[in-house]
Amino acid sequence: MEKYKLVERKSVHNSNGMLPSGPDGSTDDSSSSASHELRITQQGKPRNYITYAMKLLNGTADTSTGGVGTASKGVDSKAPSGQSDDSLMKDGTKTVVLKAMGRAVNKAVTIAEILKRKAPLHQITALSSCELIDVYEPLEEGLDRVQTKRFVSCMIITLSLNPLDTTNIGYQPPLPLSEMRPGDANPDTSLVSCPA
């Protein structure tokens, strides 16, 4: 493939509404229904995602930077179209949606488990696969345009302080308080009260 260059990455919507990102990491998902969406990438640092998610759950996130600040550098968050993050916080929505594809799925699971140990979160997990179509153009004359199709695993983890649909097949209840720890260096006991 050294005689070709990637010119386009198409994605096929799946039933869960997960949209794969393009070659530059951008997506075209304007129909998101999640209150607070964090798109987990392989390059992002877990502590940044965890810090930003905890700020969203506490209602103390700085939403003026669109989810990218000093504590959340590299975190891609997106509010539903037509709503600002400030209006979502006023509605009392205490939900964080983690979305990951491919090799970032294991990082999303790790982040979700850490968050569940910091706050009493209800969880719904949805798995699917997304079809990616890569289009390559030749760098030399005489070669044809090449199109490859591949399927990648996708995971959407919804974490909420409010109860979720317990009949959903991917539902997990909050952990018992004995298994939760509010924090390491910066304890935040506003969400969790651990027994002594």
Image: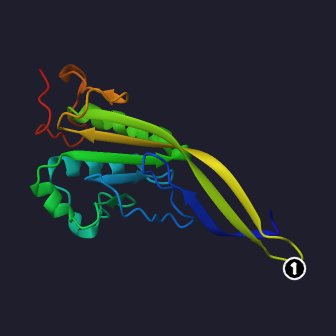
Name above or below for residue 117 compared with residue 50: above
Name above or below for residue 121 compared with residue 72: above
Report which residue position mark 1 lands on: 141
Q: Left of 101 or right of it: where is 59?
A: left
Quadrant hosting residue 192? top left
Q: Nearer the viewer, residue 103 or 187?
A: 103
For label 1, the crowd category at 10 Å Cα-Cα, with few meaning under 14, some 14 to 19 and many 20 or more, is few
Q: Left of 194 or right of it: where is 74?
A: right
Place of residue 122 in the rendered image (x, y in percent of width and height, measured from the top left)? 25, 32
Residue at 50% from the left image edge and 63% from the top image edge? 25
Q: Residue furthest right?
A: 142
Q: Amino acid at mark 1?
A: Glu
Residue at 44% from the left image edge and 65% from the top image edge? 28
Q: Nearer the viewer, residue 48 or 16?
A: 16
Q: Nearer the viewer, residue 132 or 3?
A: 132
Q: Secondary structure at mark 1?
A: loop
Residue at 14% from the left image edge and 37% from the top image edge? 191
Place of residue 158 in the rendered image (x, y in percent of width and height, measured from the top left)? 32, 41
Place of residue 188 in the rendered image (x, y in percent of width and height, measured from the top left)? 16, 41
Residue at 10% from the left image edge and 57% from the top image edge? 90
Q: Quadrant of the N terminus?
A: bottom right
